[in-house]
Image (spheres, rainbow, N blue to C red):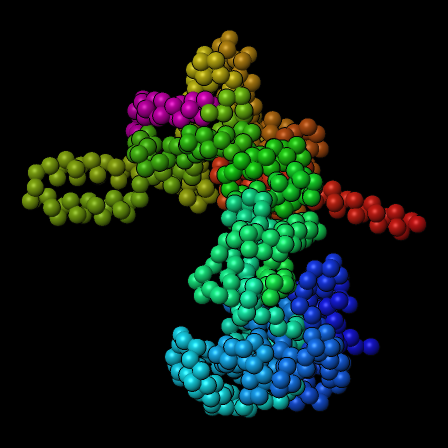
């Protein structure tokens, strides 16, 4: 049997799918005893039927709609369409719509040429009644016929004064606009008027309005909420406003918002504190409503209300939109007040809300008690390490020496070393680079005192470091053209010719460098020794300054484990040479960086020689990358059960990063330094979600067994 109409007092929060979010919320308020304007909801089922009828008054189920309207008439002591005491209705979609349509409410449905005079006599304010009729016509034309508001404004201009003659003229003009632009005239039959409004709200696919909403995926047959009109704009002790159970900008507890009395203009918004003195009982009721609804919904509440002749009505209650700062404060306060658990608090944190506040520090402390993956940071400069420690990183997961040595200011020194014609000249080039790298590494050790610092050895593609021959030739041609006009060009030409010859000779000596990706360390192994020496010199100096250093040297091996073994032997030799007796205070580790499918397939061989493995996220971008990485971790752990394994993320971390890493059994995740706080929260969320999923599985198993 189709459920077509549900009175608010008969609905429940569980009927949201049938009543829509607004109808279900107001039904819940009614059930809790809060003052809500009487009304009912046209259900999704009935609204689907409305769409199939060209003349809604004859649709099946109209009797149920009529009975619901009659109950409102009895409740209010008025009659729909009565010329003396007309019942007027507020009609709106009961679903939450996009922002540009969410405030669309048709007020004073039931006004026509006759009932408008009855309203005028009842409130003793004819200009106000005429203006209500004028606004109904305009909004009806927009909703039912898709006529833009500007069409009405262009016909008459803005109505800034409530002169009766001008309002009567506006009403006549608006009727003409509807007939000219939309087709059928505005219904004087209030039953037909109501049905067309219901059908329009159910459909929401006509004219300008729908064109702005269709992209948001609005579906046909949306439920419609109908309530009796309450008037906060005309009369004594009347007004309307919006209150928040906590400050939406700061999250401070207390009621905040705005209130406009019927005597004020549209700009006379008073703080809600004014109601405390003028209407203390109503203020107390608002405070009680905010606290109770906040407790039930465990969210800051935004409540729209009307005061009519000293009586309070709640028009809407929903979760408020908060600033990131307010969101974090509210989450922590809710946990401290016992409204939610700490675990629930952590799960509520969204990435967009992770901003520096004292509440964030509390959440991070809770997160650290839950997470089971270490959060490290990427660093290309000492300032990155400083940021990382400030945000709570537990070490540096990858410090790229290529970012340090291949900067614009240092690249010329690297190229000069590469283009050296003799071993001695190349050695001098390396000696110039060593103190630069040592200084950077030492500063990072100082920032990360006591925490591990993983340093990836520079090993770029060899050809990437060589000057482009074509560019050099073009420069030579330019200098040759200028040779006869300025002194000194001959010297520059000789230097340029020599550089071109060197680059061409290196390409001839290493013809596979571009085709097969030959690395700098393959051509000049001395580059490894220089970097390792810089690391241990920085460690030695830091140790002598009383710091605890934990270097972790990361090698990008692209062959069998024997290559890593040779580099490891070199590292041990340099450590012994530089550190001497201080070596006992420097517990370093050597690991391998795994990038690409080929390395992932040979990981078992690397695991023999490595103290840890660091996987790049490039693998995950390959077809079947996740399965490939999973197999690599399993193979590595079979070879060495307690091997430390981690993931280095270059761009962005989120919950999915840690959900995946936890499933893979990763020990750590390294992320950009500015994302460390977010990573700590996400790491805890991944643990909590896994617990919830495991609990659900266990409960299902118990139910199945029972």
Q: Position of residue 75 (x, y in %)?
A: 72, 74
Does 185 sit left or right of 507 as displayed? Answer: right
The magenta stretch spans residue 702? no
**Residue at the image position 84 percent from the left and 50 percent from the top:** 700
Q: Quadrant of residue 578?
A: top left
Does 313 sit left or right of 485 as displayed? Answer: right
Instruction: Say if residue 379 shows up in the picture.
Output: yes
**Residue at the image position 59 percent from the left and 61 percent from the top:** 304
Q: Position of residue 23 (x, y in %)?
A: 68, 67
Residue 523, placed above or below residue 44: above
Q: Which secondary structure dominates the residues rendered in magenta? A: helix
The one nearer the camera, 132 or 552, is 132
Residue 574, placed above or below residue 143: above
Does 484 sit left or right of 677 as displayed? Answer: left
Identify the residue at the far top of this view.
Answer: 581
Q: Position of residue 77 (x, y in %)?
A: 70, 77
Residue stretch rendered in magenta on the structure: 418-446
Residue 114, placed above or below residue 466: below
Q: Quadrant of residue 268?
A: bottom left
Residue 352, placed above or below residue 310: above
């Amino acid at each position: 049997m189709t459920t077509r109409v549900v009175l608010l007092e008969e609905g429940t929060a569980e009927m949201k799918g049938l009543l829509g979010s607004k109808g279900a919320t107001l039904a819940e308020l009614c059930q809790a005893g809060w003052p809500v304007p009487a009304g009912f909801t046209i259900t999704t089922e009935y609204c689907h039927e409305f769409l199939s009828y060209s003349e809604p008054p004859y649709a099946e189920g109209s009797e149920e709609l009529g009975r619901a309207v009659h109950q409102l008439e009895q409740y209010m002591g008025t009659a729909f369409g009565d010329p003396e005491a007309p019942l007027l209705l507020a009609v709106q979609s009961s679903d939450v719509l996009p922002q540009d349509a969410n405030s669309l409410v048709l007020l004073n449905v039931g006004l026509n040429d006759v009932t408008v005079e009855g309203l005028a006599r009842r409130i003793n304010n004819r200009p106000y009644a005429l203006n209500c009729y004028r606004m109904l016509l305009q909004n009806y034309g927009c909703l039912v016929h898709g006529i833009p508001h500007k069409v009405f404004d262009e016909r008459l201009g803005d109505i800034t004064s409530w002169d009766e003659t001008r309002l009567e003229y506006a009403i006549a003009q608006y009727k003409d606009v509807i007939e000219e632009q939309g087709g059928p005239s505005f219904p004087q039959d209030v039953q037909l008027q109501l049905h067309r409004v219901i059908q329009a709200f159910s459909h929401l696919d006509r004219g300008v309005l729908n064109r702005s909403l269709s992209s948001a995926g609005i579906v046909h047959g949306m439920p419609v909420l109908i309530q009796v009109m309450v008037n906060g704009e005309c009369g004594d002790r009347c007004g309307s406003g919006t209150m928040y159970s906590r400050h939406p900008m700061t999250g401070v507890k207390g009621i905040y918002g705005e209130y406009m009395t019927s005597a004020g203009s549209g700009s006379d918004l008073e703080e809600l504190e004014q109601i405390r003195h003028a209407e203390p009982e109503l203020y107390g009721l608002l405070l009680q409503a905010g606290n109770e609804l906040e407790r039930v919904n465990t969210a800051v509440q935004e409540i729209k209300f009307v005061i009519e002749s000293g009586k309070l009505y709640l028009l809407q209650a929903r979760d408020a939109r908060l600033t990131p700062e307010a969101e974090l404060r509210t989450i922590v306060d809710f946990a401290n007040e016992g409204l939610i658990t700490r675990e629930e608090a952590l799960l509520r944190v969204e990435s967009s809300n992770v901003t520096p506040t004292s509440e964030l520090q509390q959440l991070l402390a809770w997160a650290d008690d839950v997470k089971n993956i270490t959060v490290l940071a990427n660093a290309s400069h000492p300032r990155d390490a400083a940021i990382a420690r400030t945000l709570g990183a537990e070490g540096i997961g990858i410090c790229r020496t290529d970012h340090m040595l291949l900067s614009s200011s240092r690249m010329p020194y690297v190229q000069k070393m590469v283009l050296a014609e003799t071993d001695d000249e190349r050695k001098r080039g390396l000696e110039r680079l060593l103190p630069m790298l040592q200084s950077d590494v030492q500063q990072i050790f100082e920032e990360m005192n006591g925490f591990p610092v993983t340093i990836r050895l520079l090993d770029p593609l060899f050809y990437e470091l060589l000057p482009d021959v074509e560019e050099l030739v073009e420069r030579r041609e330019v200098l040759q053209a200028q040779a006869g006009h300025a002194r000194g060009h001959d010297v520059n030409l000789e230097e340029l010719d020599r550089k071109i010859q060197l680059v061409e000779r290196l390409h001839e000596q290493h013809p596979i460098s571009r085709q097969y990706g030959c690395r700098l360390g393959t051509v000049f192994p001395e580059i490894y020794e220089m970097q390792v020496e810089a690391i241990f010199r920085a460690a030695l100096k830091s140790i002598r300054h009383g710091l605890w250093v934990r270097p972790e040297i990361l090698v990008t091996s692209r062959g069998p484990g024997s290559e890593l073994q040779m580099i490891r032997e070199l590292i041990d030799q340099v450590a012994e040479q530089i550190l001497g007796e201080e070596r006992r205070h420097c517990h370093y580790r050597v690991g391998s960086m795994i990038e690409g499918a080929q390395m992932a397939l040979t990981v078992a061989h690397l695991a023999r020689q490595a103290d840890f493995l660091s996987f790049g996220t490039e693998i995950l971008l390959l077809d079947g990358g996740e399965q490939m990485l999973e197999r690599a971790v399993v193979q590595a752990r079979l070879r060495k059960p307690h091997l430390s394994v981690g993931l280095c993320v270059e761009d962005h971390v989120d919950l999915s990063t840690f959900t995946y890493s936890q499933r893979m059994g990763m020990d750590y995740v390294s992320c950009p330094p500015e994302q460390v706080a977010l990573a700590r929260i996400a790491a805890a969320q991944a643990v909590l979600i896994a617990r919830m999923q495991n609990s659900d599985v266990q409960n299902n198993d118990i139910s199945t067994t029972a």
